[in-house]
Image: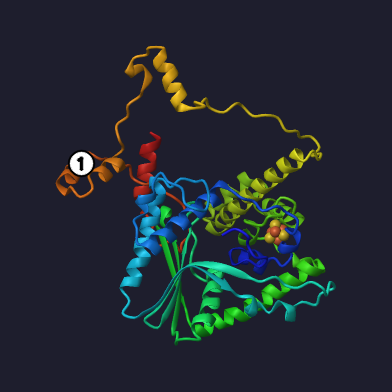
Amino acid sequence: MTNHALLSPSAANMWFECPASLWLSKDEPDQSSAYAAEGTTAHALAEYCFKFGKQASVLIGMKTAVNDIEVDEEMAEAVQSYVDTVNGIKDSMTTLYVFDIEQRLDFSDLLDLSANINTVNTSYTPKKSFGTADVIILGDGGLQVHDLKYGKGVRVSAENNRQLLIYALAAYYYYSLGCEINKISIHIHQPRLNHYSEFSVTPEDLIAFGKQLKDKAGEAYAVYINGPRKADDFCAGESQCRFCKAAGKCETLAKHVENVIDADFTNLDDEVIEDVNNDEGEALAKKFKAIAMIKSWIKAVETRVQAQLQLGNSVPGFKLVLSRQGNRAWANEEDAENTLKSFRLKQDEMYSRKLISPTQALKVLKGSEIRIKKLEEIITRPEGKPTIVPESDKRPAISPADDFTDLTQEEI
Ligand code: SF4
């Protein structure tokens, strides 16, 4: 999951939409995050469950081989739900040929970069392009690619998802050498968002996507080697700029944000009144869509300013200081316990007891249906709050009338 290829499938939206993104990101350091590390652990846990047929809960409180992050209950539950879904699909098949986990797929030949680039630096040899599919299932005449996304930030749709289409294409060429494949589907699992998305594509459409992939990869690669030559080598937009490592320094994105704000937020008050009066939902939708991109741009700029200041470079008008100290914690719990005991503190003074949560109680009582039924009578769960999601979301829209009643009551 680390050591990404230059034309990495997970960044496909970026180099598909903005050919200069790879060039501008060339010297930018990899941005590792705690979320990414957590995702790596979750994938390792899933791999362990698939390969050894174990329950994810077996590893709670333990570390996997990939990093120092401990598997916790939330992770075990989410990964188990993903593993169960995929195993269920596999077990329902009449004929199963392949069930591959963490399958590395080389798609260099599909890009054929050396044929595409008109390079100034002729000594440059394209590196291999590869990606790793979480699960590949081949059976009942179909090829399936499954992807676990452990994050709970944004729902990702499988529909025309370029990352998974690249995996599917590479897998299709590889596995179709040995058997006939009539249907192909890609599946995204986001267990922490209770979200599952599936998209089917015909072999013909997948091959047509391959042609587009080759063109786009060639274009991005040529700019990467030779540098940008024309203004539209840069193209800002939500899907491509969100994960671009150069977002904090990119003038095209800064200009784009400025234009969006200028066009949509000048005289905001007047506009909103006018929009509401004229029921101009379109204008509101446009502004709402821009929020995610503006937020990620703000974060990218903040990260860059901090990095520059940490390197000792000047960012006029700003400096780095230490923030407020963090919360107190015991340097060593055992030492702390012994010291407090030596003070002859009472048990109640030394320890705090807390009732277990409903989730923990249900786990403790697993298998005891009568007691669980009794317990469920005393568990409450607040209703979900109205949340804005894209129209493609599978959940049914709530009734506006009910919703407003609830909101009014809440405010009161
Ligand atoms: S920030 Fe956006 S416009 Fe700028 S290089 Fe990256 S993807 Fe392209």
**Is disc 1 surrounded by few (<14), some (14 to 19) or many (20+) residues within 10 Å?**
some
Residue 231 falls in image quadrant: bottom right
Residue 53 falls in image quadrant: bottom left
- Please name whichever residue, 193 or 167, is drawn nearer the observer in this view of the structure: 167
Residue 406 rendering spot, x and y as whole percentages: 35, 43
In the image, residue 117 above or below residue 275: below
Residue 47 rendering spot, x and y as whole percentages: 44, 61
SS at mark 1 in the image: helix
In the rendered view of the protein, which quadrant contains the N terminus? bottom right
The residue at the point 66 percent across, 77 percent down is: 111
Residue 196 falls in image quadrant: bottom left
Question: Residue beneath label 1, please?
Answer: 375
The residue at the point 52 percent across, 77 percent down is: 171
Q: Is residue 140 visible?
A: yes
In the image, residue 157 above or below residue 316: below
Relative placement, left or right, of 48 versus 378 is: right
